[in-house]
């Protein structure tokens, strides 16, 4: 990962800066684009490219030099293509962007209906084996949202009450992966649980901003490591057992809740 104060220094430095600034002015998400173009810029410096001619051969050699997966290289081509199109507006020849072939071998763990039932029960009773805390109170609600709406863990942790429409039963996800936003409907049963949860938080004067507040701060979300401690305990208490049959199998994890939602 390149340092945040990286200074562009290749023959295309000005064009890269102008392209990124243009995307920002148009409200585009640029973090990923910046990361990729920093990598490209550093490579062009390393090979001492002095002519403003970004050829297919140069791009191919740069792709080959990158220590990232073929999946990442494939996905990053869209960002490079955008920059090359920008260069073409200045009369520069458009190189051919060849997407590396890849085959994803990732195998998610899909929870069975029986396992989901045991997981919910274990989460509702998680305070039995541990001291009653704010985390033990809010974790079962967070787990239900991840299971019932297919949210990414980070999306769930960052939820504010202003993102929730309890009357319409809708969650508004803003600035998620790649800067995208979306609307997620809730099952009426989940909406009803959130209505009661909202009453509880207001009575206790907790989680007034974030739905799932940190136990250590009133203006911060629950930390990832806090979630994983509870998640690990719940998986154990729910007796969710997993034996890896394939190196690509991930095993039970929070993201597999999202895959389970999509599979059902």
Image (spheres, rainbow, N blue to C red):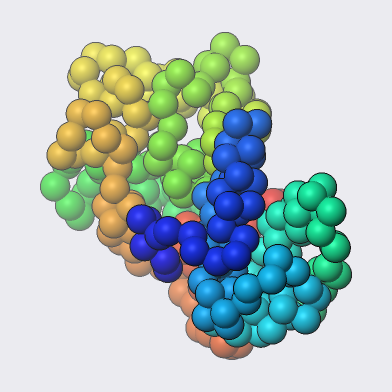
Q: Residue at x 37, y 56 (%)?
A: 4
Residue at image location 41% in from the left, 26% down from the top? 160
Q: Is residue 224 left or right of residue 71?
A: left
Res 115 seen here: no
Task: Give 99 or 24, whichever is nearer the viewer.
Answer: 24
Give the vertical position of 147 relative to 129 (above or below): above
Which quarter of the rendering shows the N terminus? bottom left
Q: Is residue 70 left or right of residue 3?
A: right
- Identified at 84% across, 53% down, the residue is 91
Q: Give the image quarter of residue 25.
A: top right
> On screen, 108 above or below 134?
below
The number of callouts visible is 0
Q: How far across and down, in percent of the image, does residue 187 sit?
A: 63, 30
Q: Quadrant of residue 207?
A: top left
Q: Residue 63 location, x and y as percent?
A: 67, 78
Q: Could you tell whether 63 is left or right of 32 in the image?
A: right
Relative to 103, is 108 above or below?
above
Residue 8 visible somewhere in the drawing: yes
Q: Residue at x 55, y 32 (%)?
A: 174
Where residue 7 appears, as percent x and y from the top left, is 42, 58
* Closer-to-camera residue (199/84): 84
Query: Seen in the image, is 128 located left or right of residue 119?
Result: left
Front position in the image: 209 or 18: 18
Determine which quarter of the picture holds residue 70: bottom right
């Amino acid at each position: 990962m390149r340092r945040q104060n990286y200074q562009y220094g290749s023959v295309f430095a000005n064009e890269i800066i102008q392209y990124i600034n243009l995307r920002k002015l148009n409200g585009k998400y640029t973090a990923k684009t910046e990361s990729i173009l920093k990598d490209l810029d550093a490579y062009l410096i390393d090979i001492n490219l002095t002519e403003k001619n970004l050829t297919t051969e140069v791009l191919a050699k740069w792709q080959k030099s990158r220590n990232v997966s073929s999946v990442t290289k494939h996905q990053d081509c869209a960002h490079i293509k955008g920059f090359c199109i920008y260069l073409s507006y200045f009369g520069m020849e458009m190189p051919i962007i060849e997407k590396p072939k890849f085959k994803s071998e990732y195998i998610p763990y899909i929870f069975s209906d029986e396992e989901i039932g045991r997981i919910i029960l274990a989460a509702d009773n998680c305070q039995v084996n541990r001291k009653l805390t704010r985390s033990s109170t809010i974790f079962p609600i967070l787990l239900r949202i991840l299971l019932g709406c297919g949210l990414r863990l980070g999306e769930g942790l960052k939820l504010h009450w202003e993102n929730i429409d309890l009357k319409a039963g809708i969650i508004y996800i803003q600035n998620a992966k790649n800067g995208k936003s979306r609307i997620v409907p809730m099952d009426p049963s989940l909406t009803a649980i959130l209505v009661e949860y909202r009453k509880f938080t207001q009575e206790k004067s907790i989680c007034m901003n974030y739905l799932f507040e940190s136990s250590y701060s009133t203006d911060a979300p629950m930390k990832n490591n806090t979630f994983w401690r509870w998640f690990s305990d719940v998986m154990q208490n729910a007796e969710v057992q997993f034996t890896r049959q394939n190196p690509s199998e991930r095993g039970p994890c929070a993201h597999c809740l999202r895959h389970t939602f999509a599979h059902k």
